[in-house]
Amino acid sequence: MLQQIKEATAFIQEKIDGFVPEAGIILGTGLGGLVEHIDILHSIDYASIPHFPISTVEGHTGRLIFGMLGGKRIVAMQGRFHYYEGYTPQQVVFPVRVMKFLGISRLFVSNASGGTNPSFRVGDLMVITDHINLIPNPLIGPNIDELGPRFPDMRDAYDPALISLATQIAEENKIKLQYGCYVSLTGPTFETPHEYGYVRAIGGDTVGMSTTPEIIAARHMGIPCFGVSIITDLATDNSVSHEEVQAQGKKAEKEMTRLFVGMLERL
């Protein structure tokens, strides 16, 4: 895997003319609109990058975007990969590995998720303070010491300093934030009523099908992480569809964009 990471990194570096990103951003379902606020310098389709997976999910465009956002050099994944697409956990986190080798020192992630906390409403932004990973761990298998330790500490999976900064930015811009624990399931089915109940019983405030593998890989490499879930449906809803999730994500992404830009400006 290490050789594949280096080959993908070298290919990208040839295309971006010495650009070194300071932060990486992973955009979830229906949240690709943040790209419209980036001063884009380079754009690379996933399909052209050696060893890169290809996103197969509607709402995930499939491009690496390099440019300026909030006065910082960033690389944004416009579309992520999921275990339910048939990729291995190691393939799911491959782009995070590459972003580290490209130079990022912080990772911002976003997702669309189902709210299990009864105080949440559709459209809320939840800052992820912790997670419960129920997707196969991407670190299973031989450890690559050049990437990180065999047993990485996950107590501060979501960086307290970045969470504090987000709170400050939100207060200044009158952005309402929720806080809580994100639970990841494999999908691709949306949860049954009892599965929603299970997620709530084990301490989850929201549930989705992504994010935790990428955070685990990033923390394995020592990258501070910040995550936001947009609540696109609720456990109490009668039904949910992928189209509804995308629509709700697009409604809330403006506030998420303001939050991310404000944070980047202060880093």
Image (cartoon, helix red, strand yellow):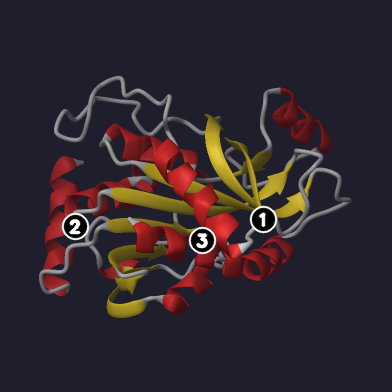
Residue 74 tag number: none
Which label's residue is closer to the chain start, 2 or 1? 2
Residue 109 visible in image: yes
Camera-nearest residue between 237 and 143: 237
Amino acid found under the numbered disc labelled 1? Lys
Residue 204: image location, x then y, percent: 66, 32
Query: Cβ–Cβ below 8 Å for labels 2 and 1?
Result: no
Amino acid found under the numbered disc labelled 2? Ala
* Image height of 209 relative to 34, above or below: above
Q: Which residue is mark 2?
A: 8
The quarter of the picture where residue 125 lies is bottom right
* Image height of 200 relative to 210, above or below: above
Q: Tell me the CA gap for discs 3 and 2.
A: 31 Å
Query: Cβ–Cβ below 8 Å for labels 3 and 2?
Result: no
Report the residue that reaches farthest toward the front.
Answer: 172
Q: Residues within 10 Å of mark 1 (few under 14, many from 20)?
A: few
Residue 185: image location, x then y, percent: 60, 37
* Image height of 18 relative to 29, above or below: below
Q: Which residue is mark 3?
A: 259
Relative to residue 52, is residue 160 drawn left or right?
Answer: right
Amino acid found under the numbered disc labelled 3? Leu
Q: Tell me the CA gap for discs 2 and 1.
A: 39 Å
Residue under the point 22% across and 30% down? 148
Tell me the SS state at disc 3: helix
Residue 176 tag number: 1
Relative to residue 230, is residue 267 drawn left or right?
Answer: left
Camera-nearest residue between 184 and 46: 184
Residue 91: image location, x then y, percent: 35, 46
